[in-house]
Image: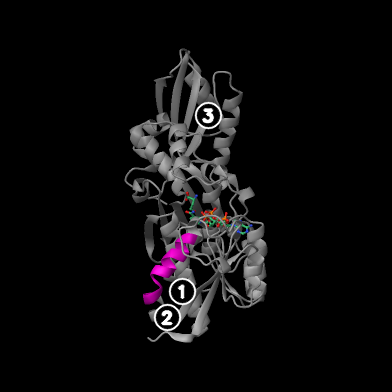
Amino acid sequence: MNVSNDKVLRIGMAGLGVVGQGVWKHLDSHRGPLEERLGARLELYCAAVRDPSRARAVEIRPDQFRRDPVEVATDAEVDLFCELMGGTDVALKATLAALEAGKMVVTANKALICEHGEAIFAAAARNDARLYFEASVAGGIPIIKALREGLVANRFPLIYGILNGTCNYILTRMEAERQGFETIVADARRLGYVEADEALDLDGWDAAHKAVILAYLAHGHWFSLDEMPVRGIREVTLDDMDWADRLGYRIKLVAMVRRDFKTDKVFCCVEPMLLRKDLVLAKVDGVYNGVSVLGDVVGESIYIGRGAGQDATASAVISDIVDAAIDRLHGVPAFMPTFVSGRVAFAPLDEVRRAYYLRLSVVDRPGVLAEVSTITARHGVSIESVLQTPGREEDRAHLVLTTHESSEKQVRDVVADLREDRAVLDPPLVLPMPDLNGR
Ligand code: NDP
Ligand code: HSE
C-alpha cells in the first residue's frame, strides 16, 4: 500500500517519561512498516511534559514541547491524544477535554481508568470519541484485546492473574535468594521498578486498579476499590514461603475476578495467595505477569509476558495507536461494546468460600493448640492440617493451619477472636488457597 501524504494521524502526547519515550522511540524506529501497512503517516506532533529542559533519550525538537496537557488534548491539529503522564487529576482533565473535543484517546493509566472509567467512557460515548487502554493492564500482554475481541463468544466465571510485576519480582527473588522483603525491595527501588507512590505496588493498589478494569471488561460493571479486599505483600515472610513449599504451594500476589452466574454475584480481590505449584501461573516469575481466563465456551486460556517496563508497555500503546489510526481511516468500530451493566453485584463475604492458610505466632505452652481449635470450631471452620515449628525466640512457636473450604466471613471472625486470645502473640496472617482446578 502507498503511504498517502494527505492521510496523516497527528499524535499529541502528554508525558514523555518511561513509557512516553518508549512509544516515541519505537514509533520512530517502526514507522516505515507500520505506515506502509496503514497507508497513512503517523506523526509525533507534540508532547507535554513538566520540565522540557530535562534530558531525554529520544529525539524531539524544542518546538514540539508543551507544558499544558489540556492544550495538547484540545489542539485542533491533534487527532489522537496519548495520555502517558499517570495520576488522576490533570490526566482526568486532559482526557475528558480530548474526548469532549471528539478526539481519539490512548492511555496506559490504570488508576485513571479504574477510578474514573465510568465518566470517561460516558464522555467518549457522548462525543462519539474513542478510548483505547490496552497498556493499562498487564503491560505488553494484549489481555484487553483478548477479552474484548478474541474471547467475545464467552462469559467469564473466573479470571485471575499476577498483575503487578514489581511484587512478583520481589516475591521471586525473596524465595530464590532467601532474602527478606526489605533487602529485595531496596534492590527493586534501585532498579526503578517500584512506583514513586510505593503503596501502589507493595500494598496491592496497582493490581487492584487492573482487576477493576478486567472486571469491567468481563462483566460490564465498575466495582469500587472500597468493596474489594486489597492487600499487598509486606506481611509475607520467607517462613511463609517455606511452609507454602512444604504444603506444595507458592505464594503469589493474585488478582481475582470470580462470578457466580447463578446469583450474578462477583467477587474481586487482590491478595497474596497460595497457588498450587503445578499451576502455570505459580511458575510465572520475576517482573513477568500472567493472566488465566476461564471462558465458558473456550475453557481456560493463559497469557504470560512482560507486565511492565518501557518496551513492553510501548508495544501495547503502539497497538492502540494503530487501532485508532485504522478507525480514523476506515471508520470501523474498533471493538464490541462491553456487557450491559447493572446485572451484577459484589458477592457478600459469607458467599466467598475458599480454603485458607493461617500463620500464628503463639506462646509455646501446653493447651494452646486446643485454644486455637476451640476458636476455629466456634466459627465452623474445619482444620485440614497443622504444622508447628519452634519460633526464633524462646517460649514462642509458629503454628500454621490450613483449613477446609470456609467462608471469608467465618475466617475473619476466627481472626478477630484469635487477636483477642492472650496466647496469640502477633496478628495472624491469613492467605487464601483458592481451588483453581476445581474452579
Ligand atoms: P513517568 O513518571 O516516567 O513519566 C511521566 C511523564 O509525564 C513525564 O514525562 C512527566 O514530565 C509527565 N508529566 C507528569 N505530570 C505532568 C503534568 N502535570 N504536566 C505535564 N507533564 C506531566 O511515568 P511512566 O512513563 O512510568 O508512566 C506513565 C503512565 O503509564 C502511568 O499512567 C503508568 O501507570 C502507566 N504505565 C507504566 C508502566 C511502566 O512500566 N512504567 C507500565 C504500564 C503502565 P517530566 O518528564 O518533565 O517530569
Ligand atoms: N508498577 C506496575 C508493575 C507497572 O509493577 O506491574 C506496570 O503497570
For residue 403, side relative to residue 284 (left or right):
right
Above or below, 413 relative to 422 = below
Give me the disc on residue 428.
3
Q: CA distance from mark 2 to mark 1?
A: 8 Å
Answer left or right for 127 relative to 229: right
| Element class at badge 3 | loop
x and y percentages locating residue 327 in the rendered image: 51, 79
Type of amino acid at the residue the image marks with label 3: Pro
**Residue that appears at 44% across and 30% down:** 401
On screen, residue 94 above or below 436: below
Q: Residue at x 44, y 54 (%)?
A: 309
Task: Look at the numbered disc 2 and give the secondary structure of its residue.
Answer: helix
Between label 3 and label 2, give the one nearer the viewer.
Answer: 2
Instruction: Mark 2 and mark 1 in contact? Answer it, CB < 8 Å.
Output: yes
Q: Position of residue 94 (x, y in %)?
A: 65, 65
* Residue 332 forms part of the magenta stretch: no
Near mark 2 (Cα within 10 A), the count class, few <14, some 14-19 or many ≥20, is: many
Q: Are marks 3 and 2 in contact (CB under 8 Å)?
A: no
Contact (Cβ within 8 Å) of mark 3 with mark 1: no
> What is the chief secondary structure element of the magenta stretch?
helix
- Judged left or right of residue 386, residue 78 is right
First reached walking from the N terminus: tag 3 or tag 1: 1
Query: Which numbered disc, 3 or 2, marks the residue that appears first in the sequence?
Result: 2
- How much space separates mark 3 and mark 1, taking CA atoms? 50 Å
Front-most of residues 414 and 150: 150
- C-alpha span from label 3 to label 2: 57 Å
Q: Where are the magenta residues, as a range?
A: 21-33
Residue bearing the label numbered 1? 322
Disc 3 crowd, CA 10 A, few/some/many (<14, 14-19, 20+): some
Residue 56 visible within the image: yes
As drawn, the label of residue 38 is: 2
